[in-house]
Image (cartoon, rainbow, N blue to C red):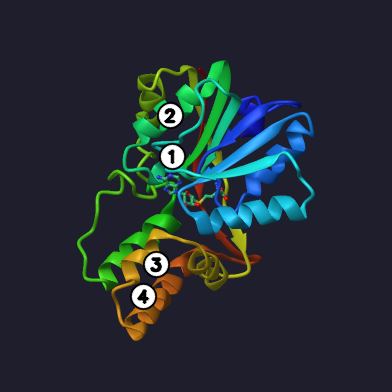
Amino acid sequence: MLGMAGVATGARVLDVAAGAGDQTLDIAARVGPRGSVLATDLSPAILEFARANAERAGHRNVRTQVADGERLGVDEAGFDAAVCRLGLMFFPDPLQGLREMHRALKPGGGICTMVFSTPQANPCVATLMATALQHAGLPLQDPYRPGGLLSLGKPGLIDGLFRAAGFRDVATTKMSAPFRLASARAYLDFVRASASPIQQILAGLEPAGREAAWTAMAERLGAFDTAAGWEGPNELLLTAARR
Ligand SMILES: C[S@@+](CC[C@H](N)C(=O)[O-])C[C@H]1O[C@@H](n2cnc3c(N)ncnc32)[C@H](O)[C@@H]1O
């Protein structure tokens, strides 16, 4: 992803929806002390993890800034590269998010985003959503609705948004990134520990109702048990382009 965005030694890089900063640390190491990375996220709490993680790793070239990806509040043309890993699909208006990243990049600057692909290629995400909605007594949702986990997976959609935002040389690559864990339960532990929309859907249920939903998810995800553990299919779209 960093290579596709053109993240190189000495570059100034914008990391949008950086979360706890896992990729921020990779960027900081890759650009080196002459480069820098600005990690932005909507959540001040998660961004504090990113700051602390960067400090602990000894990176002095990392700054953080709380910002909605649709209103970054950064200088125009101030960055050589931008990345957004598993964040853009959550934006209510992803085109506006891409326009902001376009504005922040220097002419010729590179971008790479990562989002989930189709519900068919991401049966674990689709199963979690369908089971959570069923247990919460809510109707099934259009998987491609704006702001949903799979909202940018519709074939061709993200390329069109990049072009509409003004990017050129737009190219999307599919990447298989299966979850390999000891069991379906271990995958669900990971989902439960993250700020996932599944938690929001189940938030209105009593504790017993919530547990019943997680148990049903574990049973359905057991379909991906293997002799060596559990392997949940997962497909991502990496979209690279240039301002
Ligand atoms: C799945 S996490 C990904 C974090 C990180 N990029 C990673 O890959 O580990 C999604 C992140 O998007 C952030 N986010 C969601 N909507 C956002 C928005 N409109 N503007 C900025 N960040 C947003 C969340 O706060 C969360 O940290």
The answer to which of 65 and 195 lies nearer the viewer is: 65
The answer to which of 46 and 2 lies nearer the viewer is: 46
Q: Secondary structure at mark 1?
A: loop
Q: Earlier in the sequence, mark 2 or mark 3?
A: 2
The answer to which of 48 and 125 lies nearer the viewer is: 48
Q: Earlier in the sequence, mark 4 or mark 3?
A: 3
Q: Earlier in the sequence, mark 1 or mark 2?
A: 1
Residue 118 visible at all: no
Disc 4 residue crowd, few under 14, some 14–19, many 20+, Cα 10 Å: many
Label 1, label 2: how far apart the Cα atoms are: 7 Å
Label 1, label 3: how far apart the Cα atoms are: 22 Å
Residue at x 65%, y 36% (from the top left corner): 37
Residue at x 64%, y 44% (from the top left corner): 23
Check disc 4 and give the amino acid type. Ala
Label 2, label 3: how far apart the Cα atoms are: 29 Å
Q: Which residue is mark 4?
A: 213
Check disc 2 and give the amino acid type. Glu
The answer to which of 235 and 82 lies nearer the viewer is: 82
When the figure is inspected, residue 236 is found, relative to residue 243, above or below; the finding is below
Q: Which residue is mark 2?
A: 100
> Mark 1 vs ligand 1: CB under 8 Å?
yes
Label 1, label 4: how far apart the Cα atoms are: 32 Å
In the rendered structure, are the residues bearing label 1 and label 3 in contact, judged by CB atoms less than 8 Å apart? no
Disc 1 residue crowd, few under 14, some 14–19, many 20+, Cα 10 Å: many
Q: Earlier in the sequence, mark 1 or mark 4?
A: 1
Q: Secondary structure at mark 2?
A: helix
